[in-house]
Image (cartoon, coloured by chain):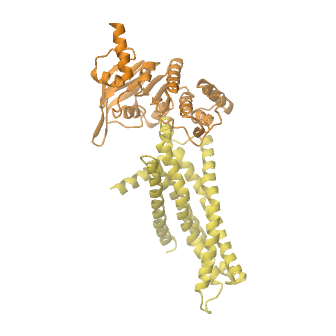
Amino acid sequence: MTYIHNIGSYFLMIAEMFRKPTKWSVMKKLIFKDIDDLIIGSLGIIAFISFFVGGVITIQTALNISNPLIPKYLVGFATKQSIVLEFAPTFTSIIMAGKVGSFITSSIGTMRVTEQIDALEVMGINSLNYLVFPKTIALMLYPFAIAIGMFLGIIGGMAACVFGEYTSLADYTLGLQTDFNTFHIIYAFIKTFIFAFILATIPSYHGYYMKGGALEVGKASTTSFVWTAVVIILLNYILTDMMLG
Amino acid sequence: MIEVKDLHKSFDEAHVLKGISTNFEKGKTNLIIGQSGSGKTVFLKCLLGLFDYEKGSISYDGKIFSQLTEDEKRNLRAKIGMVFQGSALFDSMTIAENVMFPLQMFTNQSKSEMQDRVNFVLKRVNLEDAHHKMPSEASGGMQKRVAIARAIVNNPKYLFCDEPNSGLDPKTAIVIDNLIQEITDEYQITTVINSHDMNSVMEIGEKIVFLKDGLKAWEGSNKTIFKTDNEVVTDFVYSSNLFKKVRKMYIEENS
């Protein structure tokens, strides 16, 4: 019953988020602040992880291709497919559920504990619109961060390939170009948009409706990470089956 | 004026407010007092519309709150100033930005007009040099004064204060009490204060509503509270030795 109640409350929260919008002059500043906190502030970790995981995917693929009949360009092809289809959109989103999600839950949760949300409500401000809507809009730029992640993942693979002498640059580049399917990029970005919405709203829900004190803020952050990751993985399965299956 | 009629509020099995009726008058500092667990905070949150209630009515200048549309409720709330127990200042904003916030949200004033108003109210609460400080850099007393400045910046019709003196030393507490009373007189606001501080009761309790176990046990003022024979009130008022001595002196002087 609790799960059904929470799912219902989550969708009601989303509906409420669009009601009684905050003045644009105020909202604009909130959106830019959230872009800075959530997107710009995450670029470093996305770049770092993508570059090195791209390298590891390349090394693992190269090491597991021992049969001389398998062409060397397959290393570049496998790296591209892994990064574009799964690593950049899905696994980076799970990492972001830890970084961005915890930040959102703890910041909104702390506002709940210290009565700042009550202060907004007493003033007649739609606190959900004020707090959650700018984060949702800011995270609509998340696909740009993922695009950078894809690019750096492939560059990381290229660096590992060339400097580790697993295959030639020409073979790696040929692998990147082989069977290039534009729809795979579209599929990855559709997934990313949906994950961005999940990354903004589920942690906000857990922060906004939490009860208790500082300890409960920590618990809410953990619960929010778990549920965000679970929903991303389930949606990843459903979207993949719908769009590629 | 705020009128409350037969207000009932429960949480699951717990019946917290059991039919409170009273009114809070314009231009007066109205105090809700009582022991911890008597229902003061729940009563205040019902008045603010933060809690729904099962039965009864609350009307603001004749308009029954529960019969208002959501937009009307939000418009009414824009006329309410609130000082929370923990001040509830926005941590990400400076003191000046906190005070300016209601003006940004509800008025179309230019930036210079808003800055003038912020300067005026910060001066009114003796914080003219604190504009650029963050709330975390301010003392408890300063935070309370900022909260009062934020509550009055948009000329509210109603001012609510939840335990405005909690965590403050007695001298600062008196400063805050006097400030609230001066502002109430000056702007003719309907002020409702939730407190269990007897100093506040004596200083500014122009109207006092005493709650006990979710019921109104007594109603009066700081002039009548020491004369009452109501045992529930006297138990509360004279729970400290200091007030027992004050009462003894009062009776001796008047006998």
At x 45%, y 66%, the residue is A234
Residue A208 image position (x, y, % from top left): 47, 48
> Against A241, is A219 above or below?
above
Instruction: State whether residue A178 appears in this view.
Output: no
- Camera-side residue of A190 and B45: B45
Instruction: State whether residue A16 appears in this view.
Output: yes
| Chain ID for orange | B
Q: How many marks?
A: 0
Q: Is residue A5 left or right of residue B121?
A: left
The quadrant of the rendering that contains the N terminus of chain B is top left
- Camera-side residue of A235 and A120: A120
Dividing the picture into quadrants, the one containing residue B135 is: top right
Residue B59 image position (x, y, % from top left): 39, 27
The quadrant of the rendering that contains the C terminus of chain B is top left
Residue B171 image position (x, y, % from top left): 52, 24
| Chain ID for yellow | A
> Against A185, is B121 above or below?
above
> Against A152, is A68 above or below?
below
At x 64%, y 60%, the residue is A43
At x 50%, y 71%, the residue is A240
Q: Residue furthest top?
A: B255
- Camera-side residue of A14 and B182: B182
- Camera-side residue of B76 and A37: A37
At x 39%, y 21%, the residue is B242
